[in-house]
C-alpha cells in the first residue's frame, strides 16, 4: 500500500497531463487547419466532412473521460486515507481532512482538463458546421450559374 500511496498522484497526474498535452496539440492543429481550409477545393461533401472532423472524436473522448480519471484518483486517495486510519487504529481528524483534500485535487484536475476540452470541441463543431454550410452555398451558386 505504501508504493500505491507514493505513486497514485504521479500516475493520475501523468495521465491527465498527457491528456492535456494531446488536447492542446490537436486543438491547435484543428484550429489552424480549419482557419486555412479552402472549401472550394472539395468536390465531395463527404470528403469535406471527413477532413473537417478529423481528431474531433479524440478530443471529445478526452473531454468526456478526464473527469473519470480524476475521480479514480480521488476514490483511490480516499481508500488509502481510510486504510491508513485503519492501520493506525485511531482517527486523527487532521490526517483524515488532509488526506481527503489531497485526494480531491485529482477530481479538480480532471475537471480542469475536461471543461476547456468540451468547450473546444463545441467551438470546433461550430466551425465545421460553418465550413459545411459555406461548401453547400458554393455548390448551389455554381449550379445556378
Image (cartoon, rainbow, N blue to C red):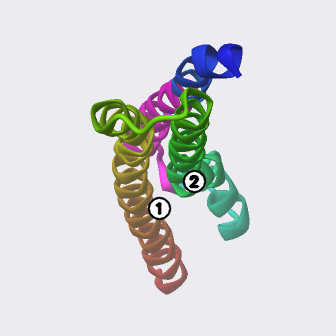
Is residue 48 positioned above or below 26 on the image?
Answer: below
Residue 31 rendering spot, x and y as whole percentages: 40, 40
Q: Earlier in the sequence, mark 1 or mark 2?
A: 2
Residue 67 rendering spot, x and y as whole percentages: 50, 52
Disc 1 on helix, strand or loop?
helix
Is residue 132 positioned above or below 59 on the image?
Answer: below
Q: Is residue 21 magenta?
A: yes
Residue 8 rendering spot, x and y as whole percentages: 60, 24
CB within 8 Å, label 1 to label 2: yes
Q: Residue 138 versus residue 87: which sits nearer the camera? A: 87
Residue 24 rendering spot, x and y as whole percentages: 44, 30
Q: At x 56% / y 17%, what residue is drawn? A: 10
Badge 1: residue crowd in 10 Å (few <14, some 14–19, many ≥20): some
Q: What residue sits right under mark 2 in the picture?
A: 52
Q: At x 39% / y 59%, what residue is drawn? A: 127
What kind of secondary structure does the magenta stretch mostly adopt? helix
Q: Residue 44 versus residue 100: which sits nearer the camera? A: 100
Q: Is residue 75 magenta?
A: no
Task: Magenta stretch: give its range.
Answer: 16-39
Q: Is residue 137 among the parts visible in the rendering? A: yes
Q: Residue 26 versus residue 143: which sits nearer the camera? A: 26
Could you give the CA–CA distance between mark 1 and mark 2, rounded to whole angstroms? 6 Å
Badge 2: residue crowd in 10 Å (few <14, some 14–19, many ≥20): many
Q: What residue sits right under mark 1 in the picture?
A: 128
Q: Residue 46 versus residue 62: which sits nearer the camera? A: 62
Is residue 106 positioned above or below 126 on the image?
Answer: above
Amino acid at each position: 500500500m505504501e508504493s500505491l500511496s507514493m505513486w497514485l498522484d504521479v500516475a493520475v497526474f501523468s495521465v491527465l497531463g498527457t491528456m492535456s498535452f494531446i488536447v492542446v496539440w490537436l486543438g491547435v492543429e484543428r484550429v489552424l487547419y480549419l482557419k486555412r481550409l479552402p472549401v472550394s477545393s472539395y468536390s465531395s461533401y463527404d470528403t469535406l466532412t471527413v477532413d473537417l472532423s478529423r481528431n474531433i472524436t479524440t478530443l471529445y473522448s478526452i473531454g468526456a473521460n478526464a473527469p473519470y480519471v480524476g475521480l479514480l484518483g480521488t476514490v483511490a486517495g480516499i481508500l488509502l486515507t481510510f486504510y491508513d486510519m485503519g492501520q493506525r487504529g485511531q482517527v486523527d481528524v487532521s490526517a483524515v481532512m488532509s488526506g481527503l483534500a489531497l485526494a480531491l485535487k485529482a477530481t479538480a484536475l480532471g475537471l480542469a482538463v475536461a471543461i476547456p476540452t468540451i468547450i473546444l470541441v463545441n467551438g470546433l463543431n461550430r466551425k465545421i458546421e460553418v465550413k459545411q454550410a459555406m461548401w453547400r452555398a458554393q455548390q448551389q451558386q455554381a449550379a445556378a450559374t
